[in-house]
Image: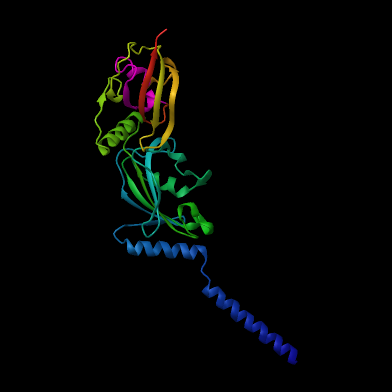
Amino acid sequence: MRKITIYLAALFGAIIFLSSCDKEYESVTDLDNRNIAEYKRANSSLSFTDVDGYSYSIINAGTGTDVKNSDSVYYSYTFKSTTGTVYTQTSDLMIPGTFLGYTDQFNIGGVTYAFKPVREVLAKLKRGGKAVLLLPSRMAFGKNGLTNFGIGSNETLVVELGIYTYEKRHQVDAFEIGTFITRNNLTFSTDANGIRYNVSTVGTGADAIGDFSTLVVNYTGRYLDGTVFDEGTGVTFRLDQLIKGWQLILPGRIKAGGKIRIIVPSHLAYGARPLDFDIEVTSVTNN
């Protein structure tokens, strides 16, 4: 009888202990909900809608017709902590564009992540619209976080989203190039094809550059955010084998010894985005 009594007492104690643990333990969902609730209280001027485990607020619905998954969009995003630390964001000098249906795809450090709520919230906007998404950790980076970006375990993310009014690549090019020039206080001329150029040295070579000239050049190619994607010293090219932007702008503007900076719209470069080149022609040969 004594053994039974001791066993029952131990069992009762274990039940009480486990019940206490259940009360103290906070599930991931509870933690996410608490973080989201705290953000809403701190940002009471925003009106949030809860759906499928996340929350969003439409700041500006935008104008025009609804955007469908099969429509191309140029969009922006900023991923932040609930306290305002920015983890990653787009640049208005390199605006991303894709079909709306693919805007939930993010390649980070060679790993592809799918954030379905990003696409769903963008789909609620028209062009020119903006929204804020509260992305719970279980729909983001979970318990592991993302240490390379400083995102902690089970961290709720604030994602600011927007769709630009532009529908065509040439419209985005014009915006990006104009923003780049204004922001950096640069002076360029514009040719009939929309190429911006600035000749710092005309050069004194005897041979003029023609459509089929062989050139020896020093050059640096950059994206508008300053990232160098290609460069070379003493490299030999035939002009007709280069991108259209070089073919259109070099003849008649510089000679051997000449230096020029050009900004080439995407359709006269590689098709993806505008490019910024510094070019020095050291030699011109016409066969």
Which residue shows up at 24% across the image and 30% down it?
187
* Quadrant where the image shows the N terminus: bottom right
Front one among 202 and 33: 202
Residue 139, above or below 238: below
* Quadrant where the image shows the C terminus: top left
Q: Is residue 30 left or right of residue 269?
A: right
Front one among 41 and 192: 192
Q: Quadrant of residue 200?
A: top left
Q: Quadrant of residue 235?
A: top left
Front one among 26 and 127: 26
Front one among 163 and 188: 188
Whether residue 146 is visible:
no
Give the image location of residue 206, x and y in percent: 32, 11
Whether residue 33 is visible:
yes
**Colour option used:** rainbow
Which residue shows up at 48% across the image and 59% down it?
152
Residue 147, above or below 114: below
Which residue shows up at 39% across the image and 27% down it?
219
Q: Is residue 107 left or right of residue 94?
A: right
Give the image location of residue 249, x and y in percent: 32, 19
Q: Which residues are magenta?
A: 246-269
Which residue reaches farthest bottom?
2
Residue 198, above or below 142: above
Q: Is residue 259 magenta?
A: yes
Q: How many marks?
A: 0
Give the image location of residue 63, x and y in percent: 29, 40
Q: Is residue 84 magenta?
A: no
Give the image location of residue 281, x and y in percent: 36, 20
Which residue shows up at 70% across the image and 88% down it?
6
